[in-house]
Amino acid sequence: MRPIVRFVLILAVLCAPLGAASAEKLRIQSLDVAGSIATKGLEKFANDLRAASGGEIDIQVLPVRSAVGPAATLDAMKSGAIDGHYSSPAYFAGKDPAFAVLGDSLAAFPDPETRDRWFGESRGIEYARKLYGQHGVQLVGVVYWPEEWLVSDRPATIMIDLSGLRIRASNGPVADFLRTIGAKVVALSGHDTLRAFDRGDLDAADWASLAANIEAGAHKTARYAVRARHSMPVTEISVSKAAWDRLSPKAQALFESKVAAFSRSQKAAFDFAFAAARAKARDQSITLLELSKTSQAEMRRRALAVLADWGTKSEAAGDIAASQRAFLERLGLVEPTVPAAAGSGG
């Protein structure tokens, strides 16, 4: 065979689309309803990945609860009922407290962007994949999710303003954290929360992002939106280990890179929704407030104490809590608890 012909054949093999491999059809369930920013974004991601892989990775997007409830998706991947999910680690805290620590960094970080740097610049993704791997699941990548705002019928600009308030929150690290600042935590469903506001039985609620709160009508009677940085959920895309292993190495690498791109596009979508929500808040006479810098520093200290306490509940939880603190120390956001060992990187 002439050299130039051989070169052309080799080049054709290297540049062949991923679709040359057998197509892998994946049923992936979203954590939100059809038409939401999360699910619409996942649908676009699925289309982009299908095109980029030449059809090798063919994702069918299922809105939340299409197959199972959001807390059952890990088990559903094991049984084969679904192949993957776009979800939050917090749903699986019952399996290992480490999922709770991984699932919400509370007020430990100044914003989700800084927290997400922990995954890429420190050992976050390593610990996350190790945890999911113990349950037969491959965490492909982390996806940006906005911080949550408090819905409140009282103004709050310093931490002590939240002390004594009856605040709705789900059991777990967020509720524990709110208790450390003196809040009286009340466990209520979303529907009951709105009714409690109407009756005057509630002062504030940990609900969702500013945009989601306004869209849900949570500020009908509670006229203050407080950026307390009390809750910064983590979301991710994972697939069963069996499905992951069926993908070619090239397809796996493409999947990971597309999840990273998806995270960036979701941030843009959520940022757009936030800007629109600010305008709606102004039109609806909802007052936007933010806790002072001094209060933020104190809340960070208390959040880290709560996460450290949760870190005593399992080895994996301890690894995650310690790694996050080490990263914050490296960034100069908290004082080191002990002199850093040479070569430590968080």
Image (cartoon, grey):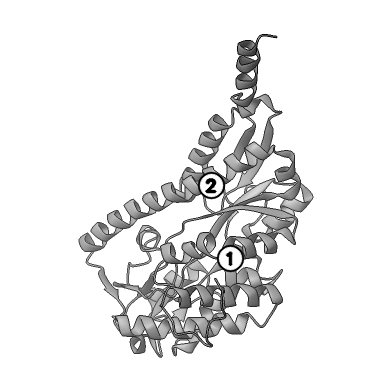
For residue 146, above or below residue 15: below
Rendered image quadrant of residue 151? bottom left
User: Of all residues shown, which one is farthest toward the front?
Assistant: 3
Disc number placed over residue 115 in the picture, else none: none
Amino acid type of the residue tagged 1 in the rendering: Arg
Viewed as shown, does residue 72 lie left or right of 205?
Answer: right
The alpha-carbon separation of the residues under discs 2 and 1 comes to 18 Å
User: Of all residues shown, which one is farthest toward the top?
Assistant: 2
What element does badge 2 sit on?
helix
What element does badge 1 sit on?
loop
Disc number placed over residue 123 in the picture, else none: 1
Residue 63 shows in this picture: yes
| Quadrant in the picture for the C terminus | bottom right
**Residue 61: % across, % down:** 58, 41
**Residue 96: % across, % down:** 70, 71
Viewed as shown, does residue 265 lie left or right of 170?
Answer: left
Viewed as shown, does residue 6 lie left or right of 48?
Answer: right
Rendered image quadrant of residue 92? bottom right
Residue at 67% of width from left, 35% of height from top?
A: 25
For residue 41, above or below residue 182: above
**Residue 200: % across, % down:** 38, 80
Viewed as shown, does residue 11 lie left or right of 261?
Answer: right
**Residue 110: % across, % down:** 39, 72
Q: Is 297 or 201 nearer to us in this picture?
A: 297
Rendered image quadrant of residue 152? bottom left
Name the mark nearer the viewer: 2 or 1: 1
Amino acid type of the residue tagged 2 in the rendering: Val
Q: How many other residues sit within 10 Å of disc 2, few (<14), some (14-19) or many (≥20)?
A: many
Residue at 44% of width from left, 80% of height from top?
A: 167
According to the picture, the residue beneath numbered tag 2 turns out to be 259
Q: Is 216 or 130 nearer to us in this picture?
A: 130
Q: Is 7 or 59 nearer to us in this picture?
A: 7
